Amino acid sequence: MENLTLEKRQLCDIQGRLFELALKNGYDCPAFIEAFMNSNAAAALDDVYDRLQWAGEEYILEELNDEVCGLKKAGTTYTEEVMYWAGYTYRYWHYYKNESSREIYQAADAKTMNECWLGFHTFDVEMAIDDLKEIDKQKRNNMKLVQFQEKFRQAFIDFNTDWIVSNFGFLEEHDKETFEKIDEELNNGAMIFFAVEDDIPLACCMSMPMKDDTWEICKLGSNKNVPHKGAGDLVFKASMEWAKEHGAKRLFIISNSKLKPALHIYEKNGFKEIKLDDYEYVRGDIAFEYFLEE
């Protein structure tokens, strides 16, 4: 067993009680877990020291609710035992493996934790974490990267339409034009990549030439109905590499600051935020660039 300090064990307990409190307050359990593990609140708990660590579960829940502009109520519920175990295990995982909350959630999402609780909750916590990481490794080994195929055309449209409409309410003209001109863009040098498992698309991303030596990395979307740990990062990296292989010197992204998981992928891959006078999309409020080495 990892020799955790008393303070670290107390933080594991606080996070376990935080997850229980979310259930008691009537929040959708998987939605809460996803929101928390990808939040600034969770990142604060990951720090060596942050005031939020000793604020208590009630205050942390209020901070998270404010951060995400309102947690989802009702919906799917897990048992109190599952919620405490998931919260405690996630926090212990951070200390045991030195991984961030976002990285941990990519390896074991809410659905995985709920499904594994029955068989794992009696294990030593480190053994449970090791087994959860092995499950994630096996799933990643079954994932394949493929270039655009006609049979995945609708998945590309559906994945992107779903997240755009669910987050912002409507498609913009730029979106519709991209979906209508997929073949034209491909003929002009663009490529769409898919992460696929058992012939089921999990995530997609597009690499598209712009002016001069600049390429846009865009339309990063995922399958909301199937766990897709690591799929977004896989297609994103492939899109970067495609642009580089086809002469790109600069990569460019327009996004929205509320899309925390996507922003994490951009920053993890070396993109730096830039300011623009025109973000092109109504929903656009943040942009990134990355200069490729010669």
Image (spheres, rainbow, N blue to C red):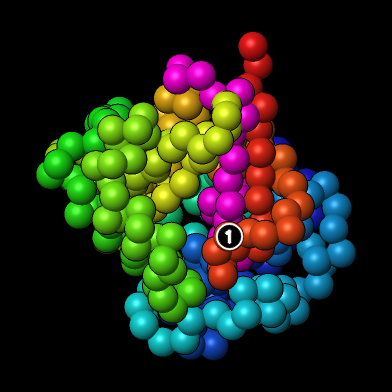
Horizontal side, residue 8 vs residue 199: left or right? right
> How many residues crowd around disc 1 within 10 Å: few (fewer than 14), some, or many (20 or more)?
few
Q: Quadrant of the C terminus?
A: top right
Task: Give residue 248's position: percent from left, percent from top.
Answer: 54, 24
As rendered, which of 206 and 104 lies closer to the eye? Answer: 206
Instruction: Kindly identify the residue that appears in the image at 41 percent across and 87 percent down.
Output: 74
Rendering quarter of residue 176: bottom left
The answer to whether 265 is drawn above or below residue 258 in the figure is above
Instruction: Kindly identify the residue that appears in the image at 24 percent across and 36 percent down.
Output: 148
Residue 215 located within the stretch drawn in magenta: no
Name the outermost residue toward the top.
294
Rendering quarter of residue 53: bottom right
Residue bearing mark 1: 280
The answer to whether 101 is drawn above or below residue 281 in the figure is above
The answer to whether 206 is drawn above or below residue 256 in the figure is above
Q: Is residue 171 visible?
A: yes
